[in-house]
Image: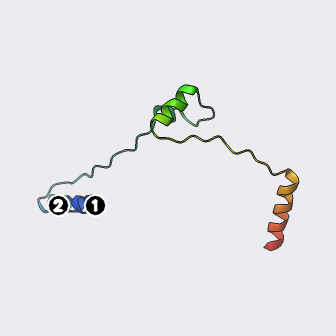
Amino acid sequence: MHKQLEMIEQQVIAEKHGLEFKKYIPKPKVPQLMNRGPLVTLSQGDIISLTSKGWEITPPQAETTTAEQKLVELLIELKGK
């Protein structure tokens, strides 16, 4: 909150003196491997790199519902509409 007020104050002072105020907006730290594109698999090095930077990696959850269960859920949903 204090930083926001400080930036507004700096912007007002700059406009008062006919200057242009450019806000400094830091960019989030994105690991290098994220720039390669969508991640489908992770190597051991990727996992070590991500966890050292504070990322939490969890394995994907296996889908346990069968096709019949999905069909029943869809039919119940359609009847409700």
How far across and how far down the image is residue 7, in percent? Answer: 24, 58
Q: Nearer the viewer, residue 9 or 14?
A: 9
Q: What residue is drawn where x is 25% and y is 51%?
A: 22
Marks 1/2: CA distance? 17 Å
Q: Which residue is mark 2?
A: 15
Check disc 2 and give the amino acid type: Glu
Q: Residue furthest left?
A: 17
Q: What residue is drawn where x is 57% and y is 26%?
A: 44
Q: Is residue 64 left or right of residue 53?
A: right
How far across and how far down the image is residue 65, in percent? Answer: 81, 52
Identify the element where label 2 is drawn: helix
State which tag comes first along the sequence, 1 or 2.
1
Q: Which residue is mark 1?
A: 4
Query: Considering only vertical position in the picture, is 43 above or below 16?
Result: above
**Quarter location, residue 81:** bottom right
**Quarter location, residue 47:** top right
Query: Looking at the rendering, in which quadrant would you find the N terminus?
Result: bottom left
Check disc 1 and give the amino acid type: Gln
Q: Residues within 10 Å of mark 1 (few under 14, many from 20)?
A: few
- Of the residues tagged 1 and 2, which is closer to the observer? 1
